[in-house]
Structure formats: structure tokens, C-alpha cells
Image: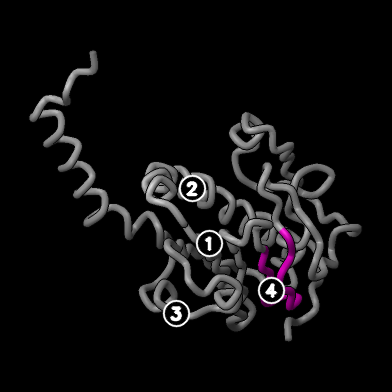
Amino acid sequence: MLRRPRPAALALTVGLGGLYLTRLRQPIMTWGATDAEAAARLPGDELLADADAMATRAIDIDASAAAVWPWLAQMGPSPRGGAYTYDWIENLLRLNMHSVDRVLPEFQHPEVGDTIGFGPNQLRVARVEPEHVLAWRSEDGNWVWTFVLESRDGTTRLISRNRFRLPTLAARIGMLPMEPGSLVMERKMLRGIKRRAERLASTTPMPSSS
């Protein structure tokens, strides 16, 4: 026989949920981004106009967009360049991620229609503007992941935006506990791209970004 939740436990659960939604969720979903960036309409948003959830995270990189772009272009499971985050966590999910510290010339020219495996829900390249925009859309159409590079006097502002359609109540509830985990992984990824791009810029003469 199932026991009913005790009032104290129920109240604690509701209270923690309210705390997360009112105080913690916004900083988690907008780590590194300004209020203006989080609210802005960015390239790639048109690929999923009616999103139910959105995360916008960003980082400053002391390198030109030409030094940042290669790491985005080659992202993906082996033999591609990985995702520059915690490989051991991703590989627990059998994603076959092995983050590299070198540019892979064979993966530097993504084209619309290319597919990249991030688990069972394949991603397809949906928008490409070299050194400016790279957007992927899941095959089911419920997830769009876009990187936007903004050049600023020799440095780059890298913005990562995830937009989700959550068609059921179960999907919306299930997304909430995943959000803090996504911050842990994406923060590591953005910092990993920053480190690689700044090192590339310091060791290789880079052309000026348009």
C-alpha cells in the first residue's frame, strides 16, 4: 500500500521547488549572459519559434572569431573533436566524446544538412555562417542549439543558446532537474573552447574576422 507523502515533506518539496523557480533558475539558465543577451532575439531562434524553455549562456574570449570557429565547427562524437566538457560523464551516456586539443582540418566546413550524433536524438546542421553562427536542430524538431560569435575589437563574445519545445507536462517537469546539470556541462564546454581558442590565437597568426 502506497503511503501518502507527509505534510512536512510535501511542504519542503514545494518550498524547494519555489526557491528554484524564483531565485535559482534564472542564473542557471543565463550563466555568463547579460540581461540584454538573454532577452534578445538571436540568429537561429527562427528555427524553433515556439520554444517552451530557453537557456542563454555566454563567455568572453580573448581571441578573434577565426580562432574560436574551428572548435565549434568540429564539435561532435569521435572522430570529431568532442564537446570540450566532462568526457567521462558524456561517455557514461555512450556518446563517444573525446575532446581534442587540436584543429581537425577535415571537419572545418560544416554544411546545412550535416548530421551530428548527440545520443539517440540526432542533430542536423540547420544554419551556418562561418565565424558568426552555427545552429543545430534535432531530428524531432524539439531542440535547437545555436552558437553566435560577436567580434569585439579582436576579442569574441561567444553566446550559446538552447531552445526546447516541451510538448507534454511530463517533459516540462522532467526538464527541471536537468537544468542544473546542463549548466555544469555547458560552463565547462564554454571555458574549454575559450582556453583552446586563446591558445590557438597565441601560437598561430589568425586572419582578421569579417
Q: Residues within 10 Å of mark 3 (few under 14, many from 20)?
A: few
Whether the magenta-drawn stretch holds residue 41 is answered as: no
- Secondary structure beneath disc 3? loop
Judging depth in this view, the residue of 86 and 95 nearest the camera is: 95
Q: Which residues are magenta?
A: 124-136
Magenta segment includes 134: yes
CA gap between label 1 and label 4 equals: 20 Å
Tell me the number on the disc at residue 119: none
Q: CA distance from mark 2 to mark 4?
A: 25 Å
Residue identified by numbered label 1: 162
* Residue occupied by mark 3: 40
Q: Label 2: state its secondary structure.
A: helix
Assign the C terminus to one quadrant of the image: bottom right
Please, what is the three-letter code of the amino acid marked with disc 3? Ala
Earlier sequence position, callout 2 versus callout 3: 3
* Left or right, 173 with reference to 67: left
Left or right: 68 in relation to 14: right
**Residue 40, horizontal then vertical, whole percent:** 44, 79
| Residue at the disc numbered 2 | 182
Tag 1–tag 2 contact (CB < 8 Å): yes
* Residue position marked by numbered label 4 in the rendering: 65
Q: Earlier in the sequence, mark 1 or mark 2?
A: 1
Picture coordinates of residue 90, whole percent (x, y): 62, 37
Furthest-left residue in view? 7
